[in-house]
Image (cartoon, rainbow, N blue to C red):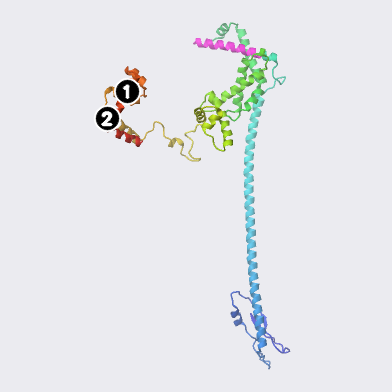
Amino acid sequence: MAISGCSSTNHSSTLPTISFSYYSPTKSCHQVFNNLQLPPSHSSSKHALKSTPEVTFATSTATHEGVTLTIDAAKAARAAVASAFEIENFLDFRERKKDDEEKTWRNGVLMRRKRRRKRRKAFSESVENEKVIMNVAIKPTNSGQYLTPKQEAEYTLCLKEEARVEAVRKRIEETSENEVTLAQWAKAAGMSKNSLDKVLCDGREAQERITRCYRRLVISVASSYQGKGLSLQDLIQEGNLGLLHGAKKFNPEKGYKLSTYVYWWIRQAITKAIAKKSKITRLPGSVSELVPRICEANAVLSRRLRKLPTCQEIAEAVKRDMLTVWLALERNREPISLDQPIVAGASMSLQEIVAGPDETTPEAIVKKQFMKRDIEKLLKGLCDREVNILRLYYGLNGNTPQSFEEIGRHLELSRERVRQISCTALTKLRQTSMVNDLITYILHS
């Protein structure tokens, strides 16, 4: 900043004019005042300016105000630059965030679309398979309805006659080693060959007509058992077997419809097939019927008690003893493959870490040998009959342990006498000092 005087001669008093150059905020007021330069005297002027107190005070006031304004302007400029920089950073951050969100949304949309297409494809394939099954399996008759009572009686009679001649053939096969001929079969059934052929043909035709007319009933029953271990095709096949089995036992003289009678045979055939073929471990029929009741009681008690129910609570709900419920739950578990990896993507399987029943460590083998030797030393203090009874009762000779009654029958002694001899032998063994050596095997096992 520089100060220059006015060069005009018309003014009586000359005030300095201030021109501000770049001002740094780091300079103090004293440095600014030190840098102020008053204008020199004009060489051509005869009347030099004389410094008066009024001129000096005005000059100082103007200089102080100029410095203050410069400092405020510098602060405002710095704040404006900082604000502009922050705004620019914020706009850049918001733009980047918007791009990332758009990219994430786009990737998420693409993944959801991909999964949706995959589900639609799987669903469409299942629907197509079911349509194929329906088209192949369901071929409506001319009337499109069930059989009439007269047709039901006629076709069921044909099935019963076919079942009778089949039973005759099986009986001949059981008694004869050679293959049954048509002549032998007809003779045993008490009819001619032509009659036998007609019975077999009528039976096959009756099976086809009944299966075709009641296939809708079979599918409606089988579809309610999906997701229990068997596919829809297998369930339909098992339902057809139950349908034919019920048709053979149908009695039209009682006045019932065939569809009402065979419904329960279809359900029974499907439930038996699920119990036998849906799991690797087959459960008895009573246990298979008990498992759904246990599962239903478990769900009800879990909602009511807000915790997992115990076997005793489930047994009280299904009105069975606790051991039966526990066995049903244990046997209903799905088996685990030994080739299954321990962790997803790992190479180690369960077979590599689970020891088999015949696998023993060298330490166990040595321990067993020493225990056998100490037991033989301990038994040397007893007589032969006492040693023999203890060996048979506890299975020390490697055989299955026997009861006192079995031992008495073998030694021609009474059960009570064998028990007395055994108690006497054990009392003698407890009095020896070698018992403590055998206790160490139990403690370290």
Which of discs 1 and 2 lies nearer the camera? The answer is 1
> Quadrant of the rendered structure where residue 399 is?
top left
Q: Position of residue 422 (x, y in %)?
A: 32, 24
Q: Is residue 174 magenta?
A: yes
**Reading the chain from its start, which is encountered first: label 1 or label 2?**
2
Residue 390 as seen in the image, left or right of residue 110: left
The range drawn in magenta is 155-177
- At mark 1, the secondary structure is helix
Residue drawn at 67 percent across, 20 percent down: 213
Badge 2 density bin: few <14, some 14–19, many ≥20, Cα 10 Å: few
- At mark 2, the secondary structure is helix
Residue drawn at 33 percent across, 35 percent down: 441
Residue drawn at 52 percent across, 34 percent down: 310
Q: Is residue 158 magenta?
A: yes
Q: Looking at the image, which is closer to me, 332 or 153?
A: 332
Q: Position of residue 55 (x, y in %)?
A: 67, 87
Q: CA distance from mark 1 to mark 2?
A: 23 Å
Q: Position of residue 334 (x, y in %)?
A: 52, 31
Q: Is residue 138 above or below residue 126?
A: above
Residue 377 numbered mark, or none = 2
Residue 420 numbered mark, or none = 1
Q: Position of residue 219 (x, y in %)?
A: 64, 25
Cβ atoms under marks 1 and 2 closer than 8 Å: no
Image quarter hosting the N terminus: bottom right
Amino acid at the residue labelled 2: Lys
**Does the rendering let one see residue 20?**
no
Residue drawn at 52 percent across, 24 percent down: 284
Image quarter hosting the C terminus: top left
Q: Is residue 112 above or below residue 155?
A: below
Badge 1 density bin: few <14, some 14–19, many ≥20, Cα 10 Å: few
> Quadrant of the rendered structure where residue 308 is?
top right
